[in-house]
Image (spheres, rainbow, N blue to C red):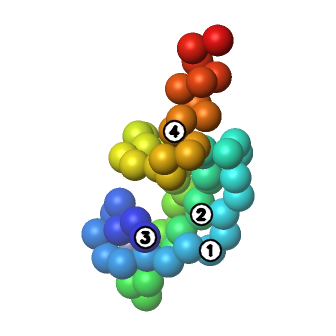
Amino acid sequence: MMKCPVCHHTSYTRTSRYLSAQTKEVYYQCQNMSCSTTFKTIESVDKIISEPLLKKQTRILETSQ
Ligand SMILES: [Zn+2]
């Protein structure tokens, strides 16, 4: 969820699509009836905080070769 950039009211997702495995384009519409601004955002993975141990070990093996 992203607040409306015009009136800072709650907005809801109209539609979204993945641009890549870690990046998503999202279209929002403001829920404030007197505003109704539509806008889009680009959301992406900034950092993986934790991941399954097996996946992490695989990644370490891949990078050490
Ligand atoms: Zn608004």
Q: Under 8 Å from ligand 1: the CB of mark 2?
A: no
Q: Earlier in the sequence, mark 3 or mark 4?
A: 3
Q: Which residue is mark 2?
A: 27
Q: Which residue is mark 1?
A: 14
Q: Which residue is mark 4?
A: 56
Residue 47: quadrant of the picture: top left
Image spot of residue 55 (x, y percent): 58, 43
Residue 5: quadrant of the picture: bottom left
Labelled pair 4, 2 in contact (Cβ < 8 Å):
no
Quadrant into which the C terminus falls = top right
Q: Which mark is residue 40?
A: none
Q: Nearer the viewer, mark 3 or mark 2?
A: 3
Q: Under 8 Å from ligand 1: the CB of mark 1?
A: no
Q: Label 2, label 1: how many angstroms apart (C-alpha)? A: 5 Å
User: What amino acid type should be assigned to the residue bearing mark 3?
Assistant: Met
User: What amino acid type should be assigned to the residue bearing mark 4?
Assistant: Lys
Q: Nearer the viewer, mark 1 or mark 3?
A: 3
Q: Nearer the viewer, mark 3 or mark 4?
A: 4
Q: Which residue is mark 3?
A: 1
Q: Are there few (<14), some (14-19), or many (20+) residues within 10 Å of tag 1?
A: few
Q: Label 1, label 4: how many angstroms apart (C-alpha)? A: 35 Å
**Residue at (64%, 22%) from the top-left corner?**
62
Q: Label 3, label 2: how many angstroms apart (C-alpha)? A: 10 Å
